[in-house]
C-alpha cells in the first residue's frame, strides 16, 4: 500500500532592491492549471477592485465612494476613476479581468485608455472602440 503526501507551505521571495517580501503560494496556478509567468496588468487588478468595491457598496458594508476613499487612503477622484470601469460592457469587463500577464515593461492597455470608452453609454460603440484599442495595443507590442 502506498501513501501519498501533500505538503503546502508559504514561500518567501526577495527581489533585489525591494525591502518587502512577496508571498506566493506553492504551486500557484492559473485557471488552465499551468503556471503563467509575468505580472497581471494593472487594469485587470483595477477592474477586479471596482467589482469588489461595488459589492461592498451593494452589501451595505460601505455606504459611499467617499468612505471607500477614506478606507483605502486614496482620493475620491481615484475611486471615481476606478469605479468608472463598471460602466464598460460586461464582456469588456470580463476581457479586462483575463488579460494576458505582462512579461516586461508597461502593459499595453492603461486605465486612461479605457475612460473614453466607458464614457460612451452605447455598448455596441464601446465594443468597437475596445476592439480598436486592442488592435492598436497588439500592433505596438509586436
Image (tube, rainbow, N blue to C red):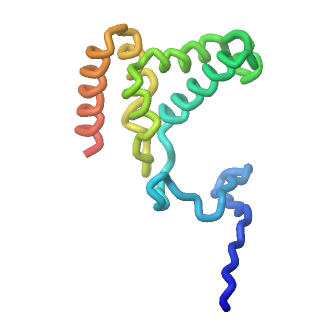
Please tell me which residue is depicted at 40% across the width and 45% down the height of the picture: 100
Q: Is residue 100 left or right of residue 13?
A: left
Q: Is residue 80 left or right of residue 3?
A: left
> Which quarter of the figure has residue 65?
top right
Q: Position of residue 115 (x, y in %)?
A: 42, 16
Q: Is residue 119 left or right of residue 58?
A: left
Please tell me which residue is depicted at 73% across the width and 61% down the height of the picture: 10
Please tell me which residue is depicted at 42% across the width and 38% down the height of the picture: 107
Image quadrant containing the N terminus: bottom right
User: Looking at the picture, does residue 44 appear above or below residue 111?
Assistant: below
- How many dots with numbers? 0
> Which quarter of the figure has residue 121?
top left
Task: Please name whichever residue, 71 or 51, is drawn nearer the observer in this view of the structure.
Answer: 51
Q: Is residue 122 left or right of residue 34?
A: left
Farthest residue, direction bottom? 1
Q: Position of residue 75 (x, y in %)?
A: 67, 14
User: Looking at the picture, does residue 43 appear above or below residue 33?
Assistant: above
Please tell me which residue is depicted at 73% across the width and 51% down the height of the picture: 19
Q: Position of residue 134 (x, y in %)?
A: 29, 32
Farthest residue, direction front? 1
Task: Please name whichever residue, 91 or 101, is drawn nearer the observer in this view of the structure.
Answer: 91
Amino acid at each position: 500500500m502506498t501513501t501519498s503526501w501533500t505538503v503546502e507551505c508559504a514561500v518567501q521571495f526577495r527581489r533585489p532592491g525591494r525591502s518587502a517580501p512577496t508571498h506566493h503560494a506553492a504551486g500557484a496556478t492559473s485557471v488552465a492549471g499551468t503556471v503563467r509567468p509575468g505580472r497581471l496588468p494593472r487594469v485587470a487588478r483595477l477592474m477586479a477592485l471596482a467589482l469588489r468595491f461595488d459589492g461592498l457598496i451593494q452589501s451595505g458594508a460601505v455606504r459611499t465612494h467617499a468612505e471607500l476613499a477614506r478606507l483605502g487612503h486614496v482620493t475620491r477622484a481615484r475611486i471615481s476613476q476606478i469605479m468608472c470601469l463598471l460602466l464598460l460592457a460586461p464582456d469588456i469587463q470580463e476581457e479586462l479581468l483575463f488579460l494576458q500577464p505582462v512579461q516586461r515593461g508597461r502593459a499595453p492597455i492603461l486605465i486612461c485608455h479605457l475612460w473614453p470608452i466607458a464614457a460612451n453609454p452605447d455598448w455596441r460603440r464601446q465594443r468597437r472602440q475596445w476592439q480598436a484599442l486592442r488592435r492598436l495595443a497588439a500592433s505596438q507590442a509586436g
